[in-house]
């Protein structure tokens, strides 16, 4: 059953509501919630951040399933999710109409994008064991470098927020899915930290929609994060993660533009390790960090290896921060020196044209200044990247905010630019008979402006409104007019603009309402861009009556009509709008035992984000949680 987009628009506007985790409003109950780690080069209070900011907490993730982050991110304003098929299918995230590889994704502060494409596949992003997701929208390259054109997402796992918890969970349900998860965190002396492990398996669906065999998926994910205090303001922080996944998929084996029922699958392994030392010396805070990651992906057809890619990323940086005060004004200045190296290899058999062995190195210098003066907040960032393959890139960002305490409101504005370097596949990729890379590509550049207002509704909630506009130059695209296909830079401009509504409200104790709405216009040389719905909206309600042993939640996430390509004729087609309705009921059977039932896509909508891919229908799941 489809819900009319016009009704959704009227409903969302009349309530002025938005996502489950809305801009500049810290959740209650813990003093740590006023700090966002990626708000600056060192953690910043939310009220000091001048960009549009969102937070997702564990309760938000659990409401929409909790096994993966993708569907929960639909509740954030400005975000459009494109999923190819069922669980494990390629899942892209476009922020404010940007490309899928234009958002920088971090897990516990360590970059998680795949060097082959420069993007991150949210199909493999777990939900269990995630304590918080921090989101900055808009161009953030001046702080975080390449990839941060659309924004930055930091996924914080068990132990990273220093909250104490112990939990075990098991679940089974539709599509032959089974899930097991364990997590624990706490404090021992000067050390705080945690560990999380989860395993999910699904028989899946037939992605091709031809009635063939189901395409299954499995994922094992383990993470740890923690901190050891050395002295006041000094610490050693660490984070590590490992993932192992297998995803079955169908492909267009006869090259007619439609998926065939094939016996293909991919095996992936990901690992990352990072550490950060913070010291206070000579009136400055010194941070020294080293991060390393490894990604490996192998594809098979009927059990025979077809290709293998492997990449290592090494990153290290030193930054120094000084804080001082002149009268009532407080100042903070951070200087950064950073090095990042990526080494990539691919192998598809002896003599194959796609075999590659590449290195890309980047060195950066940056400065980040923050000013607090009464009701005013000012930020200014400047960065220069020196890359072995491309011209040097200078990016900057300016921001300001003013709080109107008499009416509990705040106005904010940010203006800056971002850069995205080409991915290795775009530069050097090769697929026999159809694609060849272009080593002459130049980086993409984006410049954007946003203006927003945040309004507190007493102590019961807050509403946020943001207007944004951005221009992208040298956009990288695949040119299908020539054969073999190749990647090129566009000579025309891509323009994106829109409005984001974001709010949460608690009318009575135990009842929390939230929602979002985004109105987007994204065009390339005056033509609407693909997979950018003009409207997305979300509503949710969580009810946990006082002194009761049960709670119930309901969420609806709407994706408006969008355009895509029909590769049978290389024509543009329109994908229908859809609304995903999910619900969760949980009953506390004993002090540390909770039984729950949850449902996804309860109205059994046909959800198509990518033309030609089948989607999951209604899902019902039952689980038990032990612990707190």
Image (cartoon, rainbow, N blue to C red):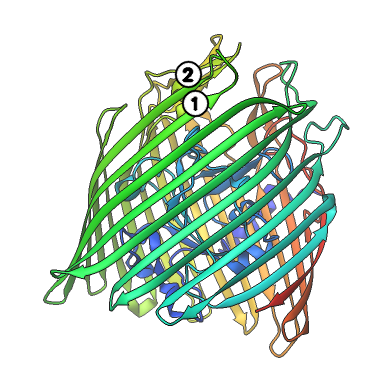
Is residue 618 shown to the viewer in this render?
no
Horizontal and vertical percent position of residue 258: 75, 23
The residue identified by callout 1 is 425
Q: Earlier in the sequence, mark 2 or mark 1?
A: 1
Horizontal and vertical percent position of residue 465: 46, 60
The image quarter containing residue 573 is top right
> Residue farthest to the left?
326
Horizontal and vertical percent position of residue 612: 74, 30
> Residue farthest to the front?
350
| Label 1 crowd (10 A; few <14 / some 14-19 / many >=20) | many
Callout 2 secondary element: loop
| Label 2 crowd (10 A; few <14 / some 14-19 / many >=20) | many
**Which quadrant: the C terminus?**
bottom right
Tell me the CA gap for discs 2 and 1.
Answer: 6 Å
- Residue 159's disc is none
Q: Residue at x 70, y 43 (%)?
A: 577
Is residue 566 shown to the viewer in this render?
yes
Q: Is residue 208 above or below residue 353?
A: below
| Foreground of the two, 127 or 463 | 127
The residue identified by callout 2 is 437
- Number of numbered discs: 2
Q: Residue at x 43, y 18 (%)?
A: 438
**162 relative position to 362: left or right:** right
**416 relative position to 24: left or right:** left
| Foreground of the two, 92 or 312 | 312
Q: Residue at x 74, y 19 (%)?
A: 253
Q: Is residue 451 above or below residue 427?
A: below
Q: Are marks 2 and 1 in contact (CB under 8 Å)?
A: yes
> Residue farthest to the right?
211
| Foreground of the two, 358 or 6 | 358
């Amino acid at each position: 059953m489809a819900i009319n987009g016009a009704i959704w628009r009227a409903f969302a506007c009349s309530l002025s509501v938005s996502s489950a985790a809305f801009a500049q409003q810290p959740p209650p109950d813990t003093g740590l919630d006023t700090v966002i780690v990626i708000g600056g080069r060192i953690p910043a209070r939310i009220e000091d951040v001048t960009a549009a900011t969102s937070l997702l907490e564990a309760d938000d993730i659990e409401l929409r399933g909790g096994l993966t982050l993708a569907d929960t991110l639909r509740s954030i304003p400005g975000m459009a999710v494109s999923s190819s098929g069922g669980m494990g299918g390629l899942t892209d995230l476009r922020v404010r109409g940007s490309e899928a590889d234009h958002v920088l994704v971090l897990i516990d502060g360590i970059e998680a994008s795949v060097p082959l494409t420069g993007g991150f596949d949210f199909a493999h992003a777990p939900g269990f064991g995630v304590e918080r997701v921090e989101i900055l929208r808009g161009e953030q390259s001046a702080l975080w470098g390449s990839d941060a054109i659309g924004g930055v997402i930091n996924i914080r796992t068990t132990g990273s927020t220093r909250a104490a918890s112990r939990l075990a969970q098991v679940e089974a349900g539709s599509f032959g899915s089974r899930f097991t998860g364990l997590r624990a965190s706490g404090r021992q002396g000067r050390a705080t930290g945690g560990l999380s492990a989860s395993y999910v398996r699904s028989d899946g669906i037939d992605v091709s929609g031809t009635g063939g065999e189901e395409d299954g998926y499995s994922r094992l994910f383990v993470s740890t994060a923690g901190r050891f205090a050395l002295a006041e303001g000094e610490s050693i922080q660490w984070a590590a993660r490992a993932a192992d996944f297998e995803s079955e998929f169908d492909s267009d084996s006869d090259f007619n533009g439609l998926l065939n029922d094939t016996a293909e699958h991919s095996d992936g392994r990901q690992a990352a390790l990072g550490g950060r030392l913070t010291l206070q010396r000579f009136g400055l805070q010194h941070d020294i960090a080293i991060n390393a990651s490894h990604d490996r992906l192998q594809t098979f057809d009927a059990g025979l290896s077809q290709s293998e890619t492997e990449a290592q990323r090494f990153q290290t940086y030193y930054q120094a921060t000084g804080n001082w005060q002149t009268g009532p004004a407080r100042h903070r200045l951070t200087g950064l020196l950073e090095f990042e190296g990526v080494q990539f290899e691919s192998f598809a058999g002896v003599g194959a044209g796609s075999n590659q062995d590449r290195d890309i190195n980047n060195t950066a210098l940056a400065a980040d200044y923050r000013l607090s003066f009464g009701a005013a907040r000012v930020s200014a960032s400047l960065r220069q990247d020196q890359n072995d393959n491309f011209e040097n890139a200078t990016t900057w960002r300016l921001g300001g905010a003013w709080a109107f305490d008499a009416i509990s409101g705040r106005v904010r504005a940010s203006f800056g630019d971002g850069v995205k370097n080409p991915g290795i596949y775009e530069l050097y990729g090769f697929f026999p008979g159809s694609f060849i890379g272009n080593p002459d590509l130049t980086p993409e550049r984006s410049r954007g402006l946003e203006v927003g207002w945040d309004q507190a509704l007493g102590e019961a909630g807050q509403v946020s409104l943001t207007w944004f506009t951005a221009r992208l130059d040298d956009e990288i695209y695949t040119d299908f007019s020539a054969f073999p296909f190749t990647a090129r830079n566009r000579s025309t401009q891509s323009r994106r603009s829109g409005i984001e509504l974001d709010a949460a409200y608690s009318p009575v104790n135990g009842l929390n309402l939230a929602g979002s709405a985004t109105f987007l216009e994204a065009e390339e040389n005056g033509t609407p861009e693909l997979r950018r719905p003009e409207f997305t909206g979300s509503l949710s309600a969580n009810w946990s009556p006082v002194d009761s042993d049960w709670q119930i939640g309901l969420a609806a996430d709407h994706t408006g009509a969008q355009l895509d390509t029909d590769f049978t004729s290389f024509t543009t087609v329109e994908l229908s709008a859809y609304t995903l309705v999910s619900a969760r009921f949980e009953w506390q059977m004993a002090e540390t035992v909770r039984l729950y039932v949850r449902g996804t896509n309860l109205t059994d909508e046909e959800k198509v984000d990518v033309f030609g891919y089948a989607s999951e229908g209604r899902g019902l799941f039952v689980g038990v949680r032990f612990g707190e």
